[in-house]
Image (spheres, rainbow, N blue to C red):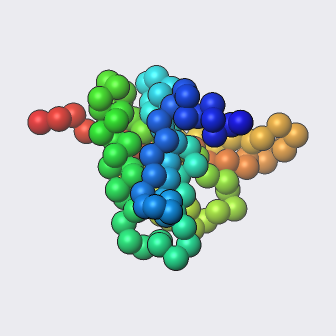
Amino acid sequence: DSLHRDARDAEVWAIGDPVRACVILTPRPPVLYLGKLAVAEPDRGQGHARTLVALATDRARAHGLADVELATRVELTGNQRAFAALGFTEVARQAHPGFARPTTILYRRPVPEVQ
């Protein structure tokens, strides 16, 4: 049901058949939120995440949005390194309801203007 809603209300992009990498792009002005950015384990390191982030940057620009944004759980240190390598900067830490400490890290990356 949630993916059906995303397909109706957002953009779902995928690489491969069968799908090897995917992302859901949701405009949340002033940002484009990248949800569920994922690459299948055997296909990691081939540039699929970089391709999807570049696509997201282009889509954000088309929507007139200033940044792309995504989040990861605090314990997923590999994701944190990958997002930093893709040019994202940590902008906030948030706690899920019921937790006293941060559980999620929010990242942003500016959308360059077209020259």
Query: Which image quarter is the N terminus in?
Result: top right
Q: Is residue 89 visible?
A: no
Q: At x 61% / y 52%, what residue is drawn?
A: 72
**Where 37 falls versus 1 (above or below)?**
below
**Residue drawn at x 47%, y 72% as measured from the top left:** 43
Residue appearing at x 55%, y 28% in the figure: 8
Number of numbered discs visible in the structure rendering: 0
| Quadrant of image for the C terminus | top left
Q: Using the image, determine if residue 94 lies above or below residue 72.
A: above
Pick out the residue farthest to the front: 17
Provide residue 2's location: percent of width, then percent of height: 68, 37
Q: Position of residue 70 (x, y in %)?
A: 53, 44
x and y percent of residue 53 in the render? 39, 50
- Outermost residue on the right side: it is 98
Left or right of 114: which side holds 5? right
In this picture, is 108 found above or below 81?
A: above
* Residue 78 visible: yes
Residue farthest along the bottom direction in this orientation:
42
Q: Nearer the viewer, residue 45 or 22?
A: 22
State the residue in front, 44 or 78: 44
Q: Residue at x 54, y 27 (%)?
A: 9
In this view, 20 is above or below 102: below
- Residue 60 as seen in the image, left or right of residue 76: left
Q: Quadrant of residue 77?
A: bottom right
Percent x, y of residue 21: 48, 59
